[in-house]
Image: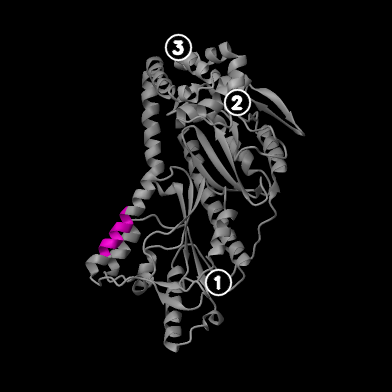
Amino acid sequence: MQEGLLQPSLPPTLPFSKFLEALIQALEGEGIRPCILRNYGGFPSENQGNDVDFLILPADLPRALRALRSTERVRIVGYIERTFVASVFVEGVSATPEYRSFQIDFFVSLSWKELPYLPVDSVLRASTPMQRGNLCFFVPSEVHEAIISLLNSLIVGGTVKEKYFPMVRRTFVSDRSTVIAALAPQFGVRVATRLVDAVICEDRRRVTRCVRPLRTALMLRSLRDRPARSILDLVRYHARVFTIRVSPKTIEAVSILDPTHCGRRTIWEGLLQMLENSAKYVEQRQIGPVRAIECEPSNGSEAKDLSLRTSSKPQISMTKVVGWFVEDWASRLLGKSNLTLHLCEESYHDLLIDPKSYSYSGPIWFVRLVCALLPASELWILLDPSSDGLQSENEPAALAKTHAQLEAYRSFVKTRKRYVILDANSPAAKIREGAYSAIIDTLADRAERTLKNRFQQRKTST
């Protein structure tokens, strides 16, 4: 819990080249041979993708994370583990000047629904050393890299990534028989030949029409060769997907309270850019009610009632809250199934603090029930204007009402487990830095708990 304006205490970001060099050295120190799947052409100074993809054995994942955590001047602020990849988000790395975070993916399986289309150990054994500047690391063979670059989007997502297609086609043309031989054990010669020839002919439509035969062949051959294991893998995959979609562990929520509703929009627009790559998705959301009292856009000081006159019947207010509740859960179930950071400008808790401003006339216990059924926010940020910032209110009655409203918000936010109160009258840059520091600290603490619980459980089970 913190109050007052947070001063930025974060060290300068580490250049991408130095971070990558330190990480590769740390991986080697843990006995892991670093194999980078693709997008290494601009190393060490430039990263051609949005992240860096390492291929490791599943048993090496704890050591890989230990190597990453040992890298100086960076902190893990996000961790999400799927059946085939563990995505780690680190703060303190500058791959591009405007960003402060970076994503590392540790692939532990090359598969579709846990059915492997290439064995990881075979790819690692065939990997070759690569020198880029002072960096020395391993990359897959040309055939394996082409297959991975194609199938990672084609068989999983049903699309062809144009970024990799020219390289894939060159490899398929020069090593056609080798590519077919590498694909045949998982897909059969007929399906593998059909795919390779479609790529060589540069017929994207024919390539995408190969998706269903590829998936069908992979599933049937897996069920034939190892039926019990394949069925277990499919069940585990769908159970993991369902858990990711409904679990609050995959959504980091930060609630921003702005009682006067006159906060500078540019603060949060800049904050979104600063937080880019601290999670898989960073989104600004407005959930729950819409405030009836807004600030006049012209000068930001005069309050104006922008709401429509609605019925004051409690049943109508309660129906609206139910609608918001259903909409929120629907967005969670049907939304992005990966680590997401939500910056929420409005929340149901505003109805608890100041129901009149939201034209809510229903019982407060009903709102409390709805709040209890939704995942709690990890952090609460209150934009609190000082007394000087409220002198623009000309009428004493309006000023007294605003003071009472602010006091209600202060009392509420102090009951939260983690909160920060920022001076809303400070320069926008300082508010952004204060909010950024609080959010990053919260994400780092949560990621630390996630990693500790995850790998303590694995250690205990083994």
Q: Residue at x 38, y 28 (%)?
A: 234
Asked whether the viewer can see residue 109, the reply is no
Sequence-first disc among 1 and 3:
3
Residue 291 point in image, percent of width and height: 39, 68
Q: Residue at x 47, y 78 (%)?
A: 302
Disc 1 target residue: 424
Residue 103 point in image, percent of width and height: 58, 42
Q: Does the magenta portion include 321?
A: yes
Q: In front here: 410 or 296? A: 296
User: Looking at numbered disc 3 in the image, what kind of residue is underneath it?
Assistant: Arg
How packed is label 3: few (under 14 Cα within 10 Å), some, or many (20 or more)? Answer: few
Sequence-first disc among 2 and 3:
2
Sequence-first disc among 1 and 2:
2
Disc 3 target residue: 190
C-alpha span from label 1 to label 3: 66 Å
C-alpha span from label 1 to label 2: 52 Å
User: Looking at numbered disc 1 in the image, what kind of residue is underneath it?
Assistant: Ala
Residue 168 point in image, percent of width and height: 58, 23
Disc 2 target residue: 166
- Furthest residue toward bottom: 396
Asked whether the viewer can see residue 313, the reply is yes
Q: How has the structure been colored for display?
A: one colour
Q: Residue at x 37, y 34 (%)?
A: 238
User: Looking at numbered disc 2 in the image, what kind of residue is underneath it?
Assistant: Pro
